[in-house]
């Protein structure tokens, strides 16, 4: 069974000294683990399993002003890896930070020089904070 989280802020880090390259407006995540079948002779024919790998996938939206920052953010391309920091609604929670691979991007350029970016991602490797 998966666990779901969401929040209203965060950032994509990747600039010099971990500077924020993109401010996340809202996000959501799904945390799930696989199960590994370890049925054996001593389980009397009954199914037995152990927890497998944990996978954290999600999406976020952000706005970007090309007039201020230049064209599209260089790191936001499918296949690229970024450092993603996500914050929850409750201020007491420690933000989650980890390496995320960008799976897909969608750009909505219906404003002047500002456009919305919708991104789907998967964390790759260990994460810190409330998703750890």
Image (spheres, rainbow, N blue to C red):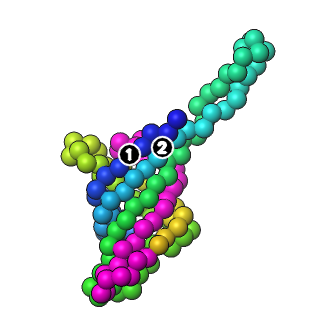
Tell me if mark 2 has few (under 14), some (14-19) or many (20+) residues whose alpha carbon lies within 10 angstroms of its own: some
Label 2 SS: strand
Residue wearing tag 1: 5
Asked where in the image residue 44 lies, by quadrant, the reply is top right
Q: Is residue 14 visible?
A: yes
| Mark 1 or 2, nearer chain start | 1
Q: Is residue 64 above or below residue 99?
A: below
Tell me if mark 1 has few (under 14), some (14-19) or many (20+) residues whose alpha carbon lies within 10 angstroms of its own: some
**Magenta segment: does it hold 115?**
yes
Please give the name of the residue rendered at 37% of the width and 57% of the height, measured from the top-left corner.
27
Residue 4 position, x and y percent, is 42, 43
Residues shaded magenta: 107-132
Q: Report the front residue among 73 and 108.
A: 108
Main secondary structure of the magenta stretch: strand
Residue 16 position, x and y percent, is 34, 72
| Cα distance between the residues tagged 1 and 2 | 8 Å
Residue wearing tag 2: 31
């Amino acid at each position: 069974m998966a666990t779901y989280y969401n929040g209203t802020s965060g950032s994509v880090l990747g600039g010099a000294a971990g500077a924020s390259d993109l401010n996340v407006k809202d996000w959501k995540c799904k945390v799930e683990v696989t199960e590994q079948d370890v049925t054996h002779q001593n389980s009397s024919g009954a199914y037995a399993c152990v927890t497998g790998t944990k996978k954290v996938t999600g999406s976020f939206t952000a706005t970007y002003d090309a007039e201020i920052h230049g064209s599209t953010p260089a790191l936001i391309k499918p296949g690229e890896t970024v450092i993603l920091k996500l914050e929850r609604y409750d201020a007491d929670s420690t933000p989650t930070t980890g390496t995320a691979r960008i799976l897909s991007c969608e750009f909505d350029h219906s404003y002047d020089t500002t456009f919305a970016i919708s991104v789907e991602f998967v964390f790759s490797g260990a994460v810190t904070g409330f998703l750890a």
